[in-house]
Image (spheres, grey):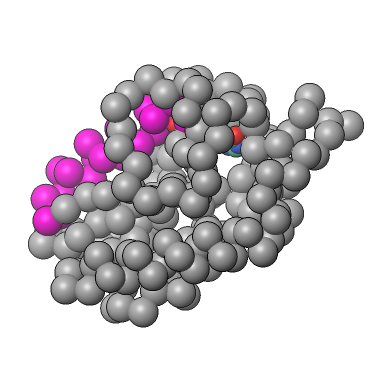
Amino acid sequence: MPDLIPVLTEEEIRSRIESLAKKISVDYCDKSLILIGVLKGAFVFLSDLMRRLTIPVEVDFVQLSSYGDSDVSSGKIKLRRGISTDLKDKDVLIVEDIVDTGLTMSKLEAYLKTFKPKSIKLCALIDKRQRRETDCRIDYACHRVEEGFLVGYGLDYAEKYRNLPAIYHLKF
Ligand code: IMP
Ligand code: MG
């Protein structure tokens, strides 16, 4: 069995999301905000974040995958589910669980741009920097790490551990 080393407690996650939600509520107070959650990993983060926003907001989801059951990105990103909302003139905030190489976010941004939204920004629960291969800009992040495979609070390894209420480093 791999070890689970604590990275963020439930309380730390809660307080970081609270600050992020306050900032987003100010930044988007005069905009048409739509959150685009990236399934499956971001659904836990998105549901907590959106309930702390104090401004009107819409929500939609996309599903992308690149990892299969591995802990290393295959680099081939598949769009498994597209959006079902009109994005024209909307201010899109992508809500992602973790950005690693950045390839998934580059692919998603290119896809979303084809729907001509007014703006696109990125909010990530975790910004993992060591293997970044693109210059994707993370506008809002809860936590930064240099390396390691993280699980819990929506993040999985081979579809397991998503249900853990806190975030852990999975040590193989
Ligand atoms: P990227 O394309 O390399 O940036 O990978 C992004 C996707 O890989 C994320 O949406 C996650 O689903 C997954 N991923 C990357 N690192 C981790 C991790 O440490 N734990 C769980 N999933 C991860
Ligand atoms: Mg993901």
Instruction: Tell me, yes or no, whether the highlighted magenta stretch contains residue 142.
Output: no
Q: Is residue 162 left or right of residue 60?
A: right
- At x 64%, y 28%, the residue is 148
* Front residue of this view, candidates 61 and 148: 148
Q: Is residue 26 left or right of residue 155?
A: left
First to last magenta residue range:
100-118
Residue 167, given in percent of the width and then of the height, sits at: 67, 48
Question: Above or below — where is 161 with respect to 15?
Answer: above
Quadrant containing the C terminus is top right
Instruction: Tell me, yes or no, whether the highlighted magenta stretch contains residue 115.
Output: yes
Residue 47 visible within the image? no
Q: Quadrant of residue 33?
A: bottom left
- At x 22%, y 50%, the residue is 120
Residue 142, given in percent of the width and then of the height, sits at: 49, 51
Q: Quadrant of residue 159?
A: top right
Q: Is residue 22 left or right of residue 162?
A: left
* Front residue of this view, candidates 50 and 54: 54
